[in-house]
Amino acid sequence: MSAEEVLIHQNKRPKAPALLTDHDGDRRIGTRKMLNQIAHGLFLLATLVGVVVLAVLLLDIFKMGWKWLNLDFLNSFASRFPAQSGIKAPLWGSLWLIAVTAPLTFIFGVGTAIYLEEYAKKNWFSRLIQLNISNLAGVPSIVFGILGLTLFVRQMKLGQSVLAGALTMTLLILPIVIVAAREAISSVPSSLRQASLAMGATRWQTIYKVVLPYSMPGILTGTILALSRAIGETAPLIMVGAVTFIYFTPGNVFDAFTVLPIQIYTWTGMPKAEFQNLAGAGIIVLLAILLTMNALAIILRNKYQRRNG
Amino acid sequence: MKSAAGSVGMNRFRKKRTWRNTWEGMIPKLLLLCALISILTTLGIVFTLIVETASFFQDVPFVQFITGTEWTALFHGSQQQFGVLPLITGTLLVTMGAAMVAIPIGLASAIYLSEYAPDGLRRVLKPILEILAGIPTVVYGFFAFTFVTPLLRNFLPEMGVFNALSASIVVGIMIIPMIASLSEDAMSSVPRGIREAAYAMGSTKLEVSLKVVVPAALSGIIASFVLGLSRAIGETMIVTLAAGATPKMTFDPTESIQTMTAYMVQAAMGDISFGSTVYKSIYAVGMTLFVFTLVMNLLAQYISRRFKEEY
């Protein structure tokens, strides 16, 4: 302990401040402790901003939308008259979109993750894929919408269909699924792999029967969280063209569709105040779906974990 | 059946082996195809943007696009002006505003969670931040439009329904969880021993946080700022709902502006014909946006690699 620090601990001001280079050494321990207390309060306050905002946001939404939420709202199409409006078309559109996006992202995402973790050699090519994935994760979602518009809607002539939207969404959330799946796969102990290979299993048998079951909880959690991102996305689907008022539910993947976030967006921007109440009610439904998906992720994870244990 | 199986047993065994070997050989190729999708996505994005943007520059000179101060793409005929600067300044205005909200609050939250918070409280606070991060942006847009703007207009009665201020604040709130969690990750990875050393020298928690932990984790923290801001630049729904649709070069946050993303939404929702200059302008603006975010993402990666403290 240096001389001035001894003085600090004796709660005395150092006699020769000119020798001190550190400003804190210049202050009494009481002041320093007080500063710490003040900072502690400020840091806590800053953290609570998030909590307060979340509470206010939920309160605002429930205040606006709760009274408008009933079975008729879920079961009727949008209308010029707020009282008769509902979310049947966007609700089914969102469900269709997720139903098509989920298997696509799962297969491609897990496939990429297995390739990178189990097969790829550590060369420039796998580094390129890796760098590419982390950059894709930072591309704004609306840019994916442009790609979807050009590639799926125009080039492949899928039109403004559920399939075009789902393919766009797949590309958008693929990086998230890949990263989660890679993490899950790389956490499988290598002793398990070696045991399986030593028993005469082939590489693929080892992956399919040992690595995948072991990493499935992590993969499923990542996939469901990615899908819950997809269900809340608006901008890319506007670009793909899922905007028009729709008065039917999709019958197959080539039908036109709209989704909950777009309906919420349309209603929020309308001049009549009642439409904002409708938007609030729509948000409650959207948040309920997100909550259900997150709960599902937790349940699936627990179920698999028990089987493994 | 039994005898037949016996007589061709060897043969069947070999057949099965061959099939399995083929399958084993095919698997890596199939998986490689999956992995190529992400490369093709990037190539697809770059390719479509370049092709349509190049076509756009045949209608509108590049210099006019990049230096023009009037953006009236959705006007008719000769009144059309394609100067991207108002959209860029609009985007930067919102991003700067968001930074002023998100950086102090995000960093302070990260310091609190990493250094100060008792374990029990941290276990409550972190999931709440995660919920905040998982809320769809259109919901934030709704919140900005129906709650924050009316609230602000109590204090600034002359401010319009659409303004950059409300959008900036809410975009800032949206990126707080991102900055907080990435910065906290960086701080938690600072070795315990360094903190212990500083405490042993008689430092207070504040001194340890600000003079030891934050400098040691600085590369990760700065990278989190850059990533957060890149996210703010690409944010679409909040600015579309709250900031308005009037492209103008102003740094007054109480005015209505238009960001690059908001223009793209407005144009895509409007009745524009395929192949027209307006249609291609979506790609030109998209290209500008893509370049902005790409540069920032690469910068974040560079900072966290180059200035990483190794322990």
Image (cartoon, rainbow, N blue to C red):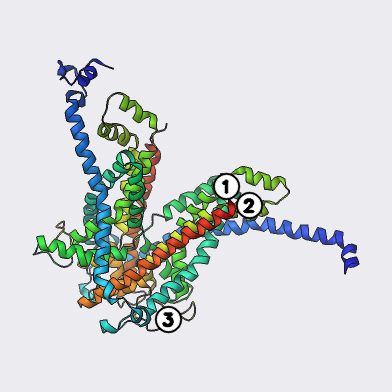
> Marks 3 and 1: same chain?
yes
Disc on the earlier residue, 2 or 1? 1
Identify residue type, mark 1. Val
In the shown orientation, is residue B256 left or right of residue B292? left
Identify the image quadrant of residue B311.
top left
Mark 2 and mark 1: span between their CA atoms? 9 Å
Host chain of mark 1: A
Q: Is residue A246 visible?
A: yes
Q: Is residue B246 left or right of residue B182?
A: left
- The amino acid at mark 3 is Thr
| Disc number for residue A249 | 3
Vertical position of residue A115 compared to residue B81: above or below? above
Q: Are marks 3 and 1 in contact (CB under 8 Å)?
A: no
Query: Label 1: which residue?
Result: A188
Decide: few, some or many residues near mark 2? Use Cα within 10 Å; few <14, some 14-19, many ≥20. Answer: some
Residue ID for mark 2? A210
Label 2–label 3 contact, CB within 8 A: no
- Residue pictured at 48% horizontal, 67% vertical: A101
Report, in whole angstroms, how far the alpha carbon at label 3 lies from the one at label 1.
43 Å
Identify the image quadrant of residue B59: bottom left
Q: Is residue A246 above or below residue B182?
A: below
Judge whether A118 appears above or below A17 on screen: below
Q: Is residue B215 left or right of residue A104?
A: left
What's under tag 2, amino acid-wise?
Answer: Val
Q: Nearer the viewer, residue A263 or B303?
A: A263
Marks 2 and 3 share the same chain: yes
Q: Are marks 2 and 1 in contact (CB under 8 Å)?
A: yes
> In terms of image quadrants, where is residue A10?
top left
Q: Secondary structure at mark 1?
A: loop
